[in-house]
Image: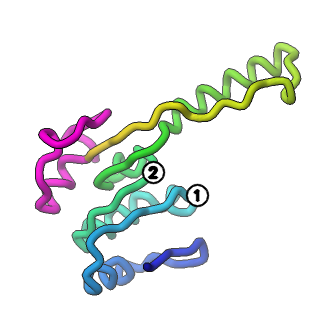
Amino acid sequence: MTSISRSSVLPPEYLQALSNEHVQAVIVLVDGMFFQERKRIAQLAASARLPAVYGFREHVDAGGLISYGVNLADNFRRAATYVVKILKGAKPGDLAVEFPNKLELIINLKISKALGGRPFADTVRADRRGDRIE
């Protein structure tokens, strides 16, 4: 098992080395550093021809293959409802804690085809599909 820590630098050789070691796929953990570097990580994974799975749809929008996780925009909208309640006088300690209750599967068909993958249309139901995800 190989992991990338926050202090790591992601040179192009890193994912290529994973490919050379016959790693078959990469799971990119939900982390601020990985989110910030999502475009670069997706490009490196594609250039090393490594399928990668991410936790947020923004990674797929940046060129990643698949994401499965919460929708950040929905979470931010839900957070805004808390702000409104607090501004109207509610005590934060009295508000119920809400957890995300909807996960979404996003598939980038363009990347899937580039990696020589089987079309997903017949195998899974995705929340969003399309070749236009770039």
Report the front residue among 90 and 73. 90
Is 55 colored magenta in this rendering?
no
Q: Residue at x 17, y 45 (%)?
A: 120
Q: Residue at x 38, y 81 (%)?
A: 14
Q: Disc 2 marks which residue?
A: 55
Query: Is 106 on the left-hand or right-hand side of 112?
Result: right
Quadrant in which residue 64 is drawn: bottom left
Residue 63 percent location from the top left of the image: 31, 54
Q: Which residues are magenta?
A: 108-134
Q: Residue at x 56, y 59 (%)?
A: 31
Query: Is 30 on the left-hand or right-hand side of 106?
Result: right
Q: Which mark is residue 92?
A: none
Is 120 colored magenta in this rendering?
yes
Amino acid found under the numbered disc labelled 2? Gly
Quadrant in which residue 48 is drawn: bottom left
Q: Is residue 20 above or below residue 96?
A: below
Q: Using the numbered discs, state the Cα–Cα distance from disc 2 to disc 1 in whole angstroms.
A: 11 Å
Query: Is 126 on the left-hand or right-hand side of 29?
Result: left
The extreme top residue here reads 88
Amino acid found under the numbered disc labelled 1? Gly
Q: Is residue 100 above or below residue 41?
A: above
| SS at circle 1 | helix
Report the front residue among 62 and 54. 54
Q: Which mark is residue 32?
A: 1
**Which of pointers 2 and 1 lies earlier in the amino acid sequence?**
1
Neighbourhood count class around disc 2 (C-alpha, 10 Å): few under 14, some 14–19, many 20 upward: many
- Give the number of callouts: 2
Q: Nearer the viewer, mark 2 or mark 1?
A: 2
Residue 88 percent location from the top left of the image: 83, 13
Query: Is 127 on the left-hand or right-hand side of 131?
Result: right
